[in-house]
Image: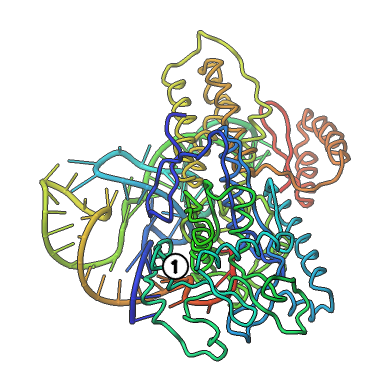
Amino acid sequence: MQSELKIYNSLSREKEVFKPLNPPFVGLYSCGPTVYNEVHLGNLRTFTTFDVVYRYLMHIGYKVRYVRNITDAGHLTNDAGEGVDRIEERAKLEMLEPMEIVQKYTNSFHEVCQEFNILPPSIEPTATGHIVEQIEMVKRIIANGFAYEVNGSVYFDVKKYSEHHDYGKLSGRVVEELLEGTRDLDGQDEKRSAADFAIWKAVTPNHIQRWVSPWGEGIPGWHIECSAMSCKYLGKEFDIHGGGMDLKFPHHEAEIAQSVGADGIQPVHYWMHANMLTVNGDKMSKSKGNSFLPKELFAGSHPLLEKAYAPMAVRFFMLQSHYRSTLDFSNVALQAAEKGFAKLINTYKTLLALKYIKDDAQKVGTEITEVKALCEEVYDKMNDDFNTAEAIAILFEMSKKINSYKEGLISISTLDEETYSRLYTVFVAFIRDILAIDKEEKHDDGLAEGLMGVILTLRKDVRDKKDWAASDKIRDELLRLSIQVKDGKEGTTWSRN
RNA sequence: GGUCGGAUGGCCGAGUGGCUAGGCUCAGCUCUGCAAAAGCUGCUACAGCGGUUCGAAUCCGCUUCCGACCUCCA
């Protein structure tokens, strides 16, 4: 590949050439789910985005340590005392221990990831497993004078911090406005300013999740876990931090402040933010009631869904847009993607079965140049801030070539061996390792293969006798079982619809 | 209200100061006993109004509309 990898950095609002701190190693952190509930399709878009980032970085030769956390400590929905702890709320609802809730939805999350072909990260740390690290970090922030304790809770002092550092630089907030924007909420009196946020929170006696700290029993603040865990596993300074756009403020902004407040070092070199999945133009979210679960999608069991969709078709649908654009979900869009996806996968299978025939007499320079160019362009597109949409467009160009070789419309010998092998390698790598859309659906054992072999042999007999009625009857009946028979020049093949 | 982002052909969705996005749909053709698949051809768009420029959909300004964040959120 000729081009350098460029990443759009939310911090600078520009695409920057990616320069890792310690090549060939790359530290990648992305915010994982809070496991009080099932993840929905919108959540999955972000995880898919960073899965592709992870896969691509590895593909181009980096040794990546990918850390994606699990938030399993409950956090109050606001700092002002009357906030709800969603994990405990859920625990009461399901009459389970908070840790049972956490385990249940962690398991479910992992299952969904697997179906979506999302790789497990290198390290998947939990917030509750790192209480000590979080407490230590809070101590360091207090020691540096950027936090204060009130009634067993510790708050980050945004005003104090902003006297020395730029709070709001990631999300484009103006500190003065944040500090002025005090809304008179009850129970907010503990905080010196409305902009301050809890990094340790005292809990009421009936709260189930609780840990001992120097400030009494309580729970860690939401933002501190990512700071503490990224620091522990990737260092005080690391390469890439990702997450959904909706985490930019306050979560990521707070992370920067905490890390700088504790250690005086800007933690992240490249901030990446994945945009939202929308439904009829509105952000998909649980509170808006327009979200659905992956399992509903795969089963087609939701009023918004006209039919069931295969996980890989949905993954492809997401990858057909750029991660920084919003992507609008709709049945027509998904069905269009489904067809394009099937086309690409058919080409992939064709390619795996294709045989290269070397014949130097048939070589055509323009064909070789064209195919070589495609192989380079597809990397150029990915190097341009992981533009999967454009990369997929190139794959479709390659697809036309590959199908033409198969159909004999273009002789495969127009390519020299090196170019053909390059095409093969690149196409397979993109489908299988980078976009990772080749996961076969769970089907039966080899029985179908065997039965179809028998049926097609018998059908060939009647076809040889030009008994088209019998031949078509077999084909029509199989079609009713969603099996498509294709009579090609090289014999008959079949596929599931 | 503040901050930021977006408006692209029948639909989805990239991108860009002048050169084909791509997919889906539709029409036609080739191939085929017929289908399916595949290939080819056609359909040429960038919200509106100004400005900069030899040239803008792409840069600047204004207008309209939409969204995100500002509270838990991927």
Q: A283 above or below B33?
A: below
Of residue A50 and residue A463, the one placed in the foreground of this image is: A50
**Which residue does the image show at 36% across and 75% down from the upper left?**
A176
Query: Residue A115: horizontal and vertical position, in percent?
Result: 73, 52
* Chain ID, mark 1: A
Image side of residue A163 versus residue B51, left or right: right
Q: A494 above or below A233?
A: above
**Which residue does the image show at 49% across and 45% down from the upper left?**
A386
Colour scheme employed for the rendering of this structure: rainbow
Query: Residue A132: horizontal and vertical position, in percent?
Result: 70, 61
Residue hosting label 1: A161
Q: B35 above or below A254?
A: above
Report if residue A328 is visible in the image: no
Q: Amino acid at mark 1?
A: Tyr
Image side of residue A292 versus residue A467, left or right: left
Query: Residue A482: horizontal and vertical position, in percent?
Result: 75, 50
Image side of residue A129 versus residue B8, left or right: right
Query: Residue A170: horizontal and vertical position, in percent?
Result: 43, 61
Image side of residue B57 versus residue A463, left or right: left
Of residue A74 and residue A190, the one placed in the foreground of this image is: A190
**Which residue does the image show at 38% across and 68% down from the upper left?**
A163
Splitting the image into 4 quarters, where does residue A433 fall? Answer: top right
